Amino acid sequence: MRHSKGFSLIEVMVTLVLTTIGILGMVAMQGRSIQYTQDSVQRNAAVMLAGDFVEIIRTNPEELFEKAPPAEPFYNAFKDNSLFYKDAGNDFATAPADCVANPKSALEMRDCWIKAAQAALPGASDLFEDAFYICRSSAPGNCNDKGSMLEIQLAWRVKAGTCPDDRASNDTTCIYRTRVEL
């Protein structure tokens, strides 16, 4: 029996199959990382927009509270109606206008925030009426006009099944929801 030197055809084929499987795995991981990067960019934009809206509210406490802080720093009775409230399925009580160059009033700041949200989040213009809301809430996801928490929900469009958050109404919508106490 002769001893052959080198690799046999079977060894080469096994190596080729294993290398191909490894490369396909790397390509799949790269595709998934791009998807997760896009989700984190959109989620980060939603976090920034929610923070901006909270700062607009804090800048204009007279629009939200019966007695505005700091005159009454521990007073937190919310008004029943405010230009900052928006129920899901409805628009704001006062229709948003175009954004002005240098917003000064609470209404102008809110309208500029709406335009920024619609520009920063994909498909937000279509989802604005139904999926966005800003309301008083005593429990997460429950706009019941009770409690001392303000809940803000923003939404944007994604490819079907790519949003890791399952709280959205369908698989092509992704949401960000936060609750703040002012």
Image (spheres, rainbow, N blue to C red):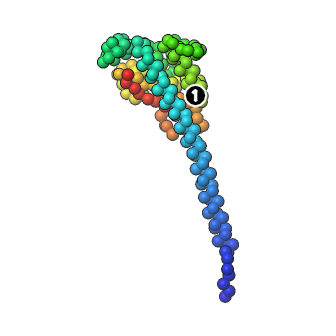
Asked which secondary structure carries label 1, the reply is helix
Packing grade of label 1 (10 A; few <14, some 14-19, many >=20) is some
Q: Residue at x 63, y 66 (%)?
A: 15
Please give left or right for residue 139 compared with residue 106 in the image: left
Relative depth, front residue between 144 and 135: 135
Q: Give the farthest residue toward the bottom.
A: 1
Q: In what quadrant of the picture does the N terminus appear?
A: bottom right
Q: In the figure, 133 relative to 6: above or below?
A: above
Where residue 97 appears, as percent x and y from the top left, is 57, 13
Q: Nearer the viewer, residue 83 or 108?
A: 108
Q: Is residue 5 above or below residue 80?
A: below
Quadrant of the drawing holding the C terminus: top left
Q: Is residue 5 visible?
A: yes
Question: Going 51% across and 12% down the picture, which residue do you hit?
Answer: 104
Up the image or down, 67 lies above or below 42; here it is above
Q: Position of residue 14 (x, y in %)?
A: 64, 67
Q: How many marks?
A: 1
Give the residue pinned by disc 1.
Answer: 120
Q: Is residue 142 visible?
A: no
Direction from residue 108 to residue 77 in the image, left or right: left
Q: Residue at x 40, y 15 (%)?
A: 61
Q: Nearer the viewer, residue 41 or 79?
A: 41
Give the residue type that dot 1 points to. Answer: Ala
Q: Residue furthest front?
A: 102
Report the residue at 68% width, 81% height from top. Answer: 4
Q: Say left or right for 7 vs 130.
A: right
Q: Quadrant of residue 149?
A: top left
